[in-house]
Image: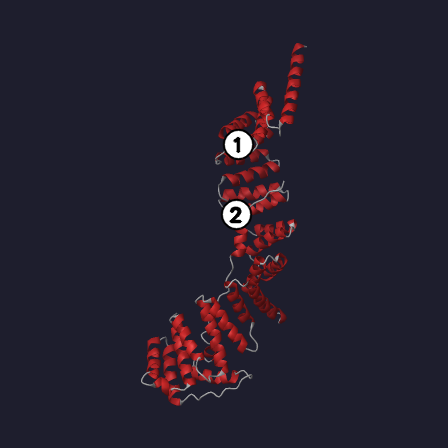
Amino acid sequence: MKMSKPSVWLRAAFLALPVVAVQVVVSQAQTDAGLRPMAAAVAQEQQGDQRETRRTPALRNQVYEKLAEAQTAAEEKDLATASRILDDMLASGGRNELNSYELANVYNLYAFIHYSREDYRKALEAYENVVSQPDIPLAMEINTRYTIAQLYFVQEQWQRGVDALLRWFDMTQNPNAAAHVLLAQGYYQLNDYNKALSNVEKAISMYREKDRIPKEQWLNLARFLYFEKNEVDKAVAVLEELLTFYPDKQYWVQLSHLYGEQKRDSLQLSAMETAYVQDMLDKGTEQVTMAYLYLNSEVPYKAAKVMDKGLDAGDIEDTSKNWEVLGNAWRQAQEIDRAIPAMEKAAAKSEDGELYARLGNIYLDGEQYNKAIDAINKGLQRGGIKRPDTARLVLGMAYFNVGQYDNARQAFQAAGRDKRSAQYARQWIQYMDSELDRQKKLQES
C-alpha cells in the first residue's frame, strides 16, 4: 500500500541556503605587512601587476613617522589617538601638502580604524578615498578594491558589491576560487542563478584541478542552485560528494528526497535509513517521513517501530494523524492487538467520525465485534466518514457475528443504497438468509 506525505519541510531544507560568509580583510597589503602602511608600500611595489607600470610618489620621512605613530596607537587599540594624529595630518592645509601616495596611506589607516569600530559605512568611504588617489601602487589599488567589494556585501548592497568585484576581476590576472564564490554569492542575492552557478562551479573546479577538497559551503551553494534550477541529477551528485567529505544529517535527508524525485525508491529508503540508524533524525517530521518510506516499501513493521519509538519519546507530535499512521502500520504488519490501542488514541483525538469507522474495521479483524459496533455507530453519529456505505457493511458484519440479524439486515440495506456497495450488500443479505435458513432446519431436525 503506497503512502504519501507532503514534503514542504523537505523543500524548506533545500531553500535554507547556508550563506557563504563574507570575511572582510581590511586590506591584504595591511595584513601582509602587519597593518603597517609603510611596510605595505614596499610589499605592494614588489607584488605589482606587470601589466601596468606606475610612477608612485615617495613616502617622505616626516609623513612616515606620523603614520608610524598613528599605526602604533591603532595596534594598541587606542583608536581615538590614532584618529587624532590622522586628523592633524589633514588639518591646516596638510591635505594639500601630502602627495597622493601619502594620502592613500592616511585613508587606508582611517579605514582600518573605522572597520575596527564596525563602522562599515565610514570604512567604505575611506577605502573609496584610497582608490581615488592617482598613481598609487597597482597592488594597493587591487587589494583595496577587493575589500571595497566585500564591505558592500557586508552592508547588503549586492549590486554595488558585484560591480566593485567585477572591476577587481578586470584588474586581476589570476583571481582565486574564493573570489569566484564571493561573486556567486552576490549574483545569488540578485537572483541571477545562472551567473551564480557558473562562478561557484569555477571555484569548485579550481580546487579539484589541484586535488583539493572543495569547501563545504561552496558545495552547498552549488547544491542549492542546482535544486533551484531543477537539475536534480547534478544536485544528487553534489550531495553525494558532500556526504563523502562532510557527512551530516541534512545531506542524508536531502539526498533521500532527491532519490525519490528520481524514482530510485530503494536508494531513497537507504539514504534515510542510514541517517535513522545513526540516531541523526532527531525531529519528529523526519521520523514520520522515515515511517512513510518504510510503508511505501511495504515494510510496515519497521514503520510501526519508528512511529512507536518517536511517539513514546515525545519526538513525534501527539496528534490524531500520527497515531493513525502508527495504527495503520501495525495493522498492515498483522499486529492487530497493537493496532487497536493506537487507532483508539487516533480516533479519540479526531474531530470527525472517520477514524472511528476505521477503528471499527480493526475491531472486526480482531473479532471484537461489540467494540466494532460501538465504534462504527459513534463514527456514523459524528459524521465526516468518507465511505459511510463501507462503514455500514462492516457494521452489518459485526451485527451478524453477534447474532443481531435484524440490525445486520438494516445495516446491509443502508449500505446497499450506495451503488458502490450494492452488490456486496446483496451478497451479505443472501448469505445471512441462507445461514438463517440453515439454522432453522437444524433446529427443526
Quadrant showing the C terminus = top right
Give the residue type at disc 2. Thr
Residue 196 seen in render: yes
Q: Earlier in the sequence, mark 2 or mark 1?
A: 2
Colouring of the image: secondary structure
Kindly identify which numbered label has been placed on residue 356.
1
Circle 2 is placed at which residue position? 285
CA–CA distance in space, label 2 to label 1: 25 Å
**Which residue is drawn at the image coordinates 54% and 38% (left, top)?**
324
* Residue 144 picture location, percent across and down: 47, 77
**Which residue is drawn at the image coordinates 54% and 41% (left, top)?**
308
- Where on the picture, by quarter, is residue 306? top right
* Residue 343 picture location, percent across and down: 53, 35
* Residue 385 picture location, percent across and down: 54, 32
Q: Residues within 10 Å of mark 2 (few under 14, many from 20)?
A: some
* Image marks 2 and 1: residues in contact by CB distance under 8 Å: no
Give the residue type at disc 1. Tyr
In the picture as drawn, the residue positioned furthest to the top comes out as: 444
